[in-house]
Image (cartoon, rainbow, N blue to C red):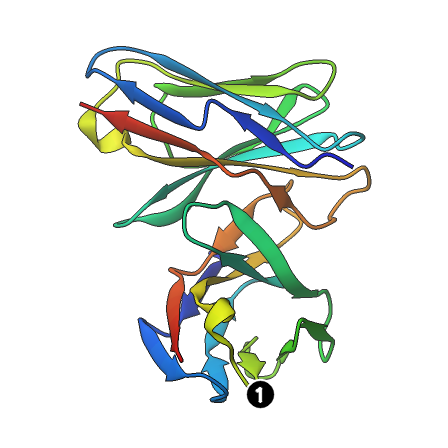
Amino acid sequence: GNSVTQMEGPVTLSEEAFLTINCTYTATGYPSLFWYVQYPGEGLQLLLKATKADDKGSNKGFEATYRKETTSFHLEKGSVQVSDSAVYFCALTNNQGGKLIFGQGTELSVKP
Amino acid sequence: KAGVTQTPRYLIKTRGQQVTLSCSPISGHRSVSWYQQTPGQGLQFLFEYFSETQRNKGNFPGRFSGRQFSNSRSEMNVSTLELGDSALYLCASSGPRENTEAFFGQGTRLTVV
């Protein structure tokens, strides 16, 4: 079946550090891939997406590239800020009627 | 453009009771999905409705049900509440075309005591 695996957290970084959160997936066919972010007490916000192999999604300094050969969609940011502290979820959809499959989430804490 | 609206935001219920949660999607969106979020199980898909029809269902017991109205608003119902049903319930809407990204509401925090 389809599944998403994320690196475990929590991840603690200093401000301006480089961020990588690993995400790998298992899916048949050609899924679309997403990163969502959840701030405390809030719902999920779409951070970026990629719908086909080699696509790069980017938003607010975050980037992720859809790598079909390694079934990965790692999230990166060159210089994190305290305001980036949140939980990040990698997800996929495989044309299954709107069903999103999420990874377990990675909590990021950025210290000043 | 208004986002996805979920009501109520917080709810406390007693074991054995039933509860109904509401979700108003973004105007023009026809697909509404529901998810349960818990610390132990993470985000799990409950079901998805499209044009008033349940199109997909997750692996939850029959106590969890939903429906969608002609204006795309959706409700989910949980009967005979158990302590383990305590969770954040998230609704997402997408559309009008197929396979577009999902936009989430802020969720309903259900506590069963």
Q: Which residue is mark 1?
A: A78
Foreground: A110 or A93?
Answer: A110
Give the residue at x 73% y 23%: B51
Output the chain of dot 1: A
Task: Answer whether residue A31 is visible to the viewer in this image.
Answer: no
Residue B97, placed above or below residue B27: below
Where is residue B99 drawn, in percent x and y? Answer: 73, 48
Give the residue at x 58% y 25%: B23
Residue B38, placed above or below residue B66: below
Q: Residue furthest front?
A: A112
B82 relative position to A10: left or right: left
Where is residue B18 drawn, in percent x and y? Answer: 32, 11
Foreground: A4 or A64?
Answer: A64
Amino acid tagged 1: Gly
B84 relative position to B95: left or right: left
Q: Quadrant of residue A106?
A: bottom left
Foreground: B33 or B58?
Answer: B33
Badge 1 crowding class, 10 Å Cα cut-off, few under 14, some 14 to 19, many 20 or more, is: few
Q: How many marks?
A: 1
Where is residue A91 drawn, in percent x and y? Answer: 53, 59
Give the residue at x 41% y 70%: A6
A4 relative position to A56: left or right: left
Give the residue at x 21% y 23%: B82
Residue B59, placed above or below residue A17: above
